[in-house]
């Protein structure tokens, strides 16, 4: 930072990548790509086609998971050799070549012919790091020239790290900060501030670092508060249906006061009465939950078939399904236990009168 408090900010650059990111410990792989995709126009039989193009290195395909329908990704040799090859998305392949295979065919981008060597499933725009319609090798010679210049300007690149696990995040950030501290600041600047950010950090970074939190505790403090806030909101939303379900169960049990009175007269114990109503409530709740999830699965299938979400594929998560069943089970248990206990304590005379007392 200079005496005038001016700063220069942006995505990463080649020199920072090579000197601070590539040497990181506890990292299995590092991928470099241009910070954002570019819109490139090409023409197929006089028809204009706008394509979202992203330039990446060869490690990009090892860090991210793509489903290849045909062909393969470009290799390190093709990247370093500056070969004009490309991988395209399924939808773009259909627009350009119809139902025929795109492998081995060429596409003209910025007056250069690129040979198509792979076709992958479409990627939704929501996945910012992975989205594109066409992927090409970045200009590796220019990247190396920028890195050798040791310039901290020219913010052009983003970096994706494949770590050994979440438990290594703190050590990786610490190692990165140590590497940055050894860099020489540009002229008229006294220090370099270069945080290693996740996509989440990038989204909320402006709020995090503009808040009056202690500097060393800023991200950790913010995430803890955000987690508590989200948990509180979810708990509030869950309490509403829980209370409604409890009231519904109470009303349903009171409608069966005569049945309860007869069972008590024939010697049914409090434990038997409570178990019966809790069991019935659990069965009804779980059946409703299964029907609800079945409806959700059907709705997702309809959305995917309609193509409402461009390049999107909404999948049904069985892990979320299991978690949902657990929540439903707890709802059924809690909403059924209180009314059952309340009714089991009523005397036979009270149940015959409708349980009003």
Image: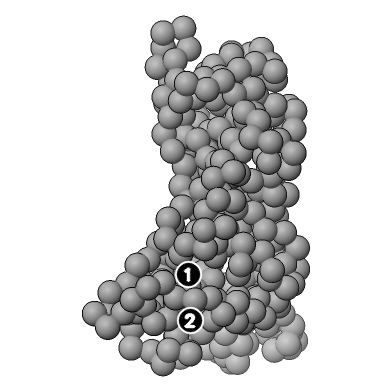
Residue at 64% across, 54% down = 31
69 w.r.t. 6: above or below: above
- Horizontal and vertical percent position of residue 173: 60, 77
Could one spot residue 285 in this view of the protein? no
Find the distance from the CA under tag 2 to the CA under tag 1: 8 Å
Residue tagged by mark 2?
A: 219
Q: Residue at x 74, y 83 (%)?
A: 272
Q: Residue at x 42, y 60 (%)?
A: 153
> x and y percent of residue 346 in the render?
57, 90
Check the image and name the residue furthest to the top.
45
Task: Answer whether residue 22 is visible to the viewer in this image.
Answer: yes
Disc marking residue 97: none
Q: Would residue 273 be found to the left or right of residue 98 on screen?
A: right
Residue 355 at x, y percent in the picture:
50, 84
In this rendering, position of residue 245 left or right of residue 2: right
Q: Nearer the viewer, residue 250 or 21?
A: 21
144 or 219: nearer the viewer = 144
Q: Secondary structure at mark 2?
A: helix
The reply to whether discs 2 and 1 touch (Cβ–Cβ < 8 Å) is: yes
> How packed is label 1: few (under 14 Cα within 10 Å), some, or many (20 or more)?
some
Q: Quadrant of the N terminus?
A: bottom left
Q: Residue at x 69, y 36 (%)?
A: 81
Residue position marked by numbered label 1 in the rendering: 201
> Circle 2: is it few (<14), some (14-19), or many (20+) Cα within 10 Å?
some
Q: Mark 2 or mark 1, which has the lower sequence index?
A: 1
Q: Is residue 254 above or below residue 109?
A: below
Q: Is residue 316 above or below residue 342?
A: above
x, y (%) of residue 234? 47, 73
317 w.r.t. 343: above or below: above
């Amino acid at each position: 930072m200079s005496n005038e408090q001016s700063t220069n900010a942006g995505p990463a650059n080649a020199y920072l990548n090579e000197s601070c990111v590539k040497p990181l410990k506890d990292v299995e792989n590092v991928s470099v790509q241009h910070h954002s995709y570019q819109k490139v126009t090409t023409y197929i039989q006089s028809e204009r086609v706008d394509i979202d193009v992203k330039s990446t290195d060869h490690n990009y395909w090892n860090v991210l998971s793509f489903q290849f329908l045909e062909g393969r990704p470009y290799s390190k040799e093709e990247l370093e050799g500056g070969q004009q090859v490309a991988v395209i998305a399924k939808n773009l392949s259909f627009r350009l070549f119809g139902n025929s295979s795109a492998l081995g065919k060429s596409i003209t981008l910025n007056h250069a012919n690129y040979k198509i060597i792979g076709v992958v499933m479409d990627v939704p725009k929501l996945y910012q790091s992975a989205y594109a319609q066409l992927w090409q090798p970045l200009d590796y010679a220019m990247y190396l020239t920028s890195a050798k210049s040791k310039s901290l300007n020219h913010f052009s690149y983003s970096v994706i790290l494949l770590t050994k696990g979440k438990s290594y995040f703190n050590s990786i950030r610490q190692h990165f900060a140590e590497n940055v501290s050894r860099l020489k600041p540009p002229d008229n600047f006294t220090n370099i501030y270069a945080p290693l950010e996740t996509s989440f950090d990038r989204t909320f970074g402006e709020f995090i670092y503009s808040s009056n939190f202690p500097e060393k505790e800023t991200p950790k403090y913010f995430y803890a508060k955000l987690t508590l806030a989200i948990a509180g909101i979810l708990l509030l939303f869950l309490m509403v249906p829980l209370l409604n379900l409890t009231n519904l169960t109470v009303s349903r049990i009171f409608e069966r006061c005569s049945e309860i009175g007869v069972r008590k007269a024939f010697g049914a114990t409090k434990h038997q009465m409570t178990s019966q109503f809790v069991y019935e409530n659990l069965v009804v709740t779980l059946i409703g939950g299964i029907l609800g999830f079945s409806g959700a699965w059907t709705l997702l299938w309809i959305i995917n078939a309609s193509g409402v979400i461009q390049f999107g594929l909404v999948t049904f998560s069985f892990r979320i399904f299991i978690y949902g069943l657990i929540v439903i089970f707890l709802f059924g248990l809690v909403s059924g236990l209180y009314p059952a206990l309340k009714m089991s304590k009523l005397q036979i005379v009270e149940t015959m009168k409708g349980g009003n007392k």
